[in-house]
Image (spheres, helix red, strand yellow):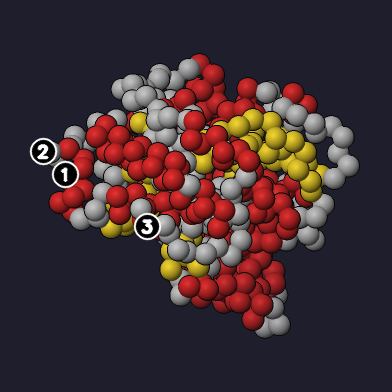
């Protein structure tokens, strides 16, 4: 066995990408419609398929960061990490090369099931929910669930002390299950460092994550401290249940690497060879997983879907209540104020030219040190400020669409320009802008799904959590789509009615 030669720079953790929502929707539309079942193997089995292709395709998320699998600038952007070393060694034992296939961490298991790659290898914890869907090899790393709190917070001691408290973690992980069982309010995050930022600024009460991750990110936050290790877990390679031959071959190679000490030496080079890893040799391979079964939505989950829909609606209404008047002020500044016009124009162009997701991150996390907004406040303000730029263009176009003769008539009867604008031009412009504003609100309703990155559990986030819990995406996805339609359709009807009314009014004029 040839040992990997890559050298680490530091120890770190994984981070699921901020595109969890988009990945889940793509899976629903592209895969769920076909049944979401694991593909049948080609003739000759998985090993023959891999040999014919000349490569072992392994799924991972590069955004997971060190020491899992990441691009190292010090090595020309080459992919490195202790799991990269493991994949190379496993592929070599099969007589092929390893090829990493990028996938959002939250959709690694669904992507494995649909055949996007041969194995999933990226800090995947062995949990009952996953074991009911895929087969796992013997573990290659043993970790602890580490509890973190602010220095001096005597409340945080163990899992029992977390009841009723807000605790940050990654959704659908072992830590997530532990928090819910302990009666804590589990706050789901898309990333890793964001959890420590929120804890540092008092937005949450604690953080529970794998010790590998805590070891990388906690030192960045001197106001925080690791309190205790409250549970243990294991990382293993996920394989489709039908590929039992492949799982057995990987198990044999892992066993040889552990028995020879090669794997321990690899872990040591990455600073991961702690006392816990001495037990790897005593742990055998996992039994083949049972056939995956989907669970029906429970009454509690249906109520949570309703709650998520209500959150989506309230955030959208509040954001539009901010965007509409601010957009009007921006439009007036560009049309009527030579002094404010450059500033208003710059605001509109910058906001429209940058992603709303980036703006939400900067508002909530980037300004946390000077403006520690709560998640709901940041969601409303962020969406409102973004949509104000688009609303300003609608108002500006509507004002420009009012016939010039309306100005002339108002000024001819002795009205000042300000009075003419307020009493004659603006009412007509607002009437013309209403259909566009209504359509923008429908778009805002759907864009509100992005606020899940601020730990707001809105409708789409609720769907992704439920889909993983229930081991099925079709029913939660269709319910989510139906609720979005139910929320948006009344406003669609309103927009059409306004367009017809304005059209009829224009004809009568």
- Secondary element under disc 3, as helix, strand or loop, is loop
Q: Nearer the viewer, mark 1 or mark 3?
A: 3
Q: Which of 305 and 404 is in front in this view?
A: 305
Badge 2 density bin: few <14, some 14–19, many ≥20, Cα 10 Å: few
As drawn, 95 above or below 462: below
Q: Is residue 229 left or right of residue 311?
A: right
Residue 102 falls in image quadrant = bottom left
Q: Which of 108 and 35 is in front in this view?
A: 108
- Secondary element under disc 1, as helix, strand or loop, is helix
Query: Residue lying farthest left?
Result: 43
Task: State the CA–CA distance, disc 2 to disc 1.
Answer: 8 Å
Of the 4 image quadrants, the one containing the C terminus is bottom left
- Secondary element under disc 2, as helix, strand or loop, is loop
Q: What residue is rendered at 64% in x and 30% in y?
A: 231
The answer to which of marks 2 and 1 sits earlier in the sequence is 2
Residue annotated with mark 1:
48
């Amino acid at each position: 066995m040839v040992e990997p030669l890559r050298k680490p720079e530091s120890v770190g953790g994984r981070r699921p990408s901020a595109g969890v929502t988009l990945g889940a929707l793509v899976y629903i539309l592209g895969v769920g419609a076909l049944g979401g079942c694991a593909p049948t193997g080609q003739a000759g089995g998985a090993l023959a398929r891999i040999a014919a292709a000349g490569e072992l395709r392994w799924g991972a998320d590069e955004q997971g960061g060190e020491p899992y699998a990441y691009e190292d600038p010090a090595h020309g952007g080459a992919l490195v990490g202790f799991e990269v070393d493991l994949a190379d060694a496993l592929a070599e034992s099969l007589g092929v090369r390893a090829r990493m296939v990028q996938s959002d961490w939250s959709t690694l298991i669904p992507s494995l099931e649909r055949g996007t790659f041969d194995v999933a290898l990226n800090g995947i914890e062995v949990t009952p929910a996953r074991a009911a869907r895929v087969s796992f090899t013997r573990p290659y790393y043993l970790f602890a669930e580490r509890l973190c709190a602010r220095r001096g917070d005597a409340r945080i001691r163990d899992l029992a002390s977390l009841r009723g408290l807000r605790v940050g973690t990654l959704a659908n992980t072992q830590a997530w299950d532990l928090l819910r069982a302990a009666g804590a309010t589990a706050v789901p995050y898309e990333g890793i460092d964001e959890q420590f930022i929120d804890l540092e600024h008092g937005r949450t009460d604690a953080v529970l994550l794998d010790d590998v991750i805590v070891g990388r990110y906690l030192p960045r936050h001197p106001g925080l401290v690791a309190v205790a290790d409250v549970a243990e877990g294991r990382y293993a390679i996920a394989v489709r249940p039908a590929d039992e031959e492949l799982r057995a071959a990987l198990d044999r190679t892992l066993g040889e690497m552990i028995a020879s000490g090669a794997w321990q030496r690899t872990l040591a080079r990455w600073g991961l060879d702690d006392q816990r890893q001495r037990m790897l040799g005593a742990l055998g391979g996992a039994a083949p997983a049972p056939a995956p079964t989907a669970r029906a939505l429970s009454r509690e989950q249906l109520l949570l879907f309703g709650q998520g829909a209500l959150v989506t609606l309230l955030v959208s209404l509040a954001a539009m209540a901010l965007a509409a008047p601010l957009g009007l002020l921006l439009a007036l500044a560009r049309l009527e104020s030579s002094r404010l016009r450059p500033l208003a124009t710059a605001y509109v162009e910058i906001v429209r030219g940058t992603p709303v997701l980036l703006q939400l991150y900067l508002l909530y996390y980037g300004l946390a040190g000077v403006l520690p907004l709560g998640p709901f406040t940041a969601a409303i303000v962020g969406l409102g400020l973004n949509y104000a730029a688009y609303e300003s263009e609608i108002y500006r176009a509507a004002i420009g669409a009012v016939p010039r003769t309306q100005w002339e008539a108002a000024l001819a009867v002795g009205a000042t320009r300000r009075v003419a604008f307020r009493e004659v031009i603006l009412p007509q412009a607002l009437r013309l802008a209403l259909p566009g504003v209504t359509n923008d609100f429908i778009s805002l309703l759907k864009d509100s799904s992005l606020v899940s990155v601020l730990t707001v559990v809105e409708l789409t986030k609720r769907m992704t959590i439920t889909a993983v819990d229930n081991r099925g995406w079709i029913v939660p996805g269709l319910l989510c789509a139906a609720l979005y339609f139910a929320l948006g359709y009344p406003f669609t009807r309103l927009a059409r009615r306004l367009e017809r009314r304005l059209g009829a009014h224009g004809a009568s004029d």
